[in-house]
Amino acid sequence: MAGGGVILSGAFSELQALAEILMAPVVTTFKGKGSFPENHPLAMGPIGMHGHAEANKMILEADCILAVGARFSDRSVGRYDEFGRGMNIIHMDVDPAEIGKNKSVDVAVVGDVKSSLRTLVKMLSKVSVRRDQNTPWLKRREELIDHYAETIKDYPRDLTARKALKKLREILPADSIVTTEVGQCQMWASLHFDVITPGTFFSSTGLGTMGFGFPASIGAKAARSEVHVVDIAGDASFNMTENSLAVSVLDQLPVIVFLMNNYMLGMVAQWQRTFYNRRYMGVHQHSCPDYAKIAQAYGAQGIKAQSLSELELAVRAALKSEIATVIDITIDPEEDVYPFVVPGTGLKDMITGS
Amino acid sequence: MPKTASPMNSVVEKVNGWHILSAMLENKPGVLFRVTNLFRARNFNIESITVGLTEQPDLSRMTITLISDERTLDQLVKQLRKLIDVVEVKVLDAEKTVYRELALIKMKAEDPTTRMEITNFASIFRANILDIGKETITVELTGTPDKIDAFKNLVDHFGIAQLARTGVSALQRGRGQ
């Protein structure tokens, strides 16, 4: 289980080396997304409230977890009294105060996780470890992925968040940097956009600050002008810092805003739909404003995409563009994020929406 | 552990999980806020805090007492150590520590018999009488928290008008730092 500490410490290759020696499946926390290549045969993706179903299921079946630079937040592990029952937990963290803060653990290793992992890899390389490609765990991983691919259905539309993000992944070079806004768009990014190059995913995780993604993408572009930078956005979050378009245009930092637009404060609406019997309050944005025109008003490029083929054309145009591009992608306002571990319940109570 | 001739059985020092912490802090504005803000943010329930100057002009000593389990205590120490202004934190072993608290207690005492009784109790507890008015007597009492509790319980029926306790100050015995 890899957390944000792996990213902060830059322990990507050490983590991968360890996973490959042990042939152990790797889940991440949401903060740890992008600490391990998500197209790797051992990758399970993020666990948690909107984690990958197979990752949530598998971590509960584990008999021993090595948690690296993770803090066991309730968003990741659900109920503390349920999580970790009957399993051993080894916790590596640089901050001694993290040990036992949220979850008491069996073994604690305090130190920079990069050097801790490196030491562990060295020690394990000396003992003979069988690198079996057909371990029961890997078979179980395949089983779970197949099972949930069937049970968790995509929302029945031609253009959905899942399809849009899979398409983006297809087109975007692996070394591109991705930032996210906060809300449904963020959780969809976590679920449906695989980070391939470690350390290229940036999201406001702890505080969940709406409006973070767009300025963050501009900052990333300023630091790494040679790679493409995409902000995976939602309409409500983009509203918070949309005026950064001026910075992007004036300082010639051409980023791409991949705006999945359901004209809703989508996550709030999903909770009102799920827990309050559709008694909506303050969540509708009623086709206001027109984001393509907003972009144009700043001198940026604005493109509307209402189908998967329009989306593909827009992304390809944006990748070639020398100015920032806002791609306004129409998403159905009723499309929910699943799976969903309802607050106060455990990972085992995850609902799949189908 | 120092004991007083207390008739009480709810002696605070005997409560399971009663701890004394001693912390050295940078003596500058805003430090106290950072420490107390940490208690608030992490929901630590503190019994008492005292802060004052030390032998080093740039450092102040904070003495904290609290009732907690080992895990909470461990977290409190670790979290305090993360603050840049906290130079050192120690959990003091009550058996190897001298600790005292000061209390000012103002009691209702209108008739001569009551006054006599209070004066007697005060002398048994080695408390100083600071003020006698027409209706009240104020005494100053120094001791361990349970001694103060014992005195308070003894004079409770006279009617305590006001009471102020400083909280515990503590130092390790001998050469302990």
Image (tube, coloured by chain):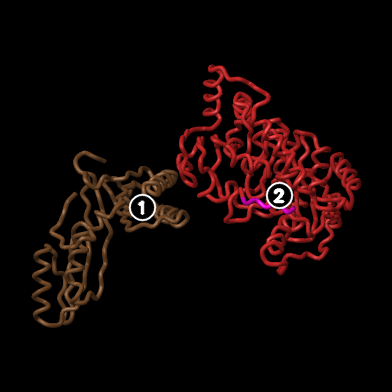
Chain colours: A red, B brown
Q: Is residue A150 above or below residue B141?
A: above
Looking at the image, residue A145 sits to the left or right of residue B170; the answer is right
Question: Where does residue B61 sit, x and y in percent of width and height?
Answer: 31, 49
Question: Mark 2: which secondary structure?
Answer: helix
Residue under numbered circle 2:
A186
**Whether residue B57 is visible:** yes
The residue at 45%/39% (across/down) is A96
Looking at the image, residue B79 sits to the left or right of residue B6; the answer is right
Residue under numbered circle 1:
B68
Q: How many marks?
A: 2
The residues bearing labels 1 and 2 have C-alpha atoms spaced at a distance of 39 Å
Nearer the observer, disc 1 or disc 2? 1
The amino acid type, in three-letter code, at marker 2 is Gln
User: Most prominent secondary structure in the magenta stretch?
Assistant: loop
| A290 and A51: which is toward the camera | A51
Q: Check residue A350 for magenta coloring.
A: yes
Question: Where does residue A25 sit, x and y in percent of width and height?
Answer: 64, 33
Residue interval drawn in magenta: A349-354
The residue at 44%/44% (across/down) is B82
Question: Where does residue A196 sit, x and y in percent of width and height?
Answer: 73, 34
Question: Mark 1: which secondary structure?
Answer: loop
Task: Pinpoint the chain carrying mark 1.
Answer: B
The residue at 52%/43% (across/down) is A84
The amino acid type, in three-letter code, at marker 1 is Ser
Q: Check residue A204 for magenta coloring.
A: no
Q: Looking at the rendering, which quadrant does residue B105 occupy? A: bottom left
Q: Say which quadrant the N terminus of chain A sits in.
A: top right
The residue at 71%/60% (across/down) is A270
